[in-house]
Image (cartoon, rainbow, N blue to C red):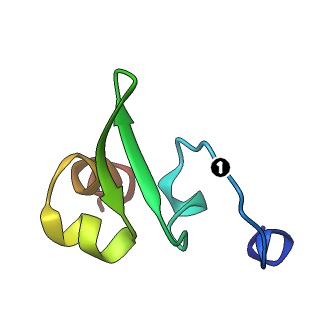
Amino acid sequence: MDKLMEGRTSFVIAHRLSTIRNADIILVMDHSNIIEQGNHEPLMAKGGFYADLYNSQFAK
């Protein structure tokens, strides 16, 4: 999918966070509101909603 979107503006709506991990900008929404934004690393470092959701999907 990365190759297909290269050089283009794309909107991807995903429940599986592995799909959007390499996105330049991730918008995290809850009840129709944007509650966090950034790319994967800062969102994980923030430890907010995105990090909790990501960790719940990939926890061992």
Q: In this view, does 25 lie to the left or right of 42?
A: right
- SS of the residue under disc 1: loop
From the image, tell me which residue sits under label 1: 12
* Other-residue count near label 1 (Cα within 10 Å), few / some / many at <14 / 14–19 / ≥20: few
Looking at the image, how many numbered discs can be counted on the residues?
Answer: 1
Compared with 41, 52 (above or below) is above
Residue lying at the far right in this picture: please name it: 4
User: Is residue 25 or residue 21 the one in the foreground?
Assistant: 25
Judge left or right: residue 38 versus residue 26. left
Q: Which residue does the image show at 25% across and 57% down from the upper left?
A: 51
Is 45 situated above or below 12? below
Q: Position of residue 38 (x, y in %)?
A: 35, 65
Q: Which amino acid does label 1 sit on?
A: Val
Depth check: give the residue in front, 29 or 56. Answer: 29
Residue found 65% across the figure and 49% down from its top:
12
- Quadrant in which the N terminus is drawn: bottom right
Task: Between residue 45 and residue 36, name the one nearer to us.
Answer: 36
43 in relation to 50, above or below: below
Quarter-of-image position of residue 40: bottom left
Residue at horizontal 60 percent and vertical 59 percent from the top: 19
Q: Where is residue 7 in the image (x, y as percent from the top left)?
A: 78, 78
Q: In which quarter of the image is residue 60?
A: bottom left
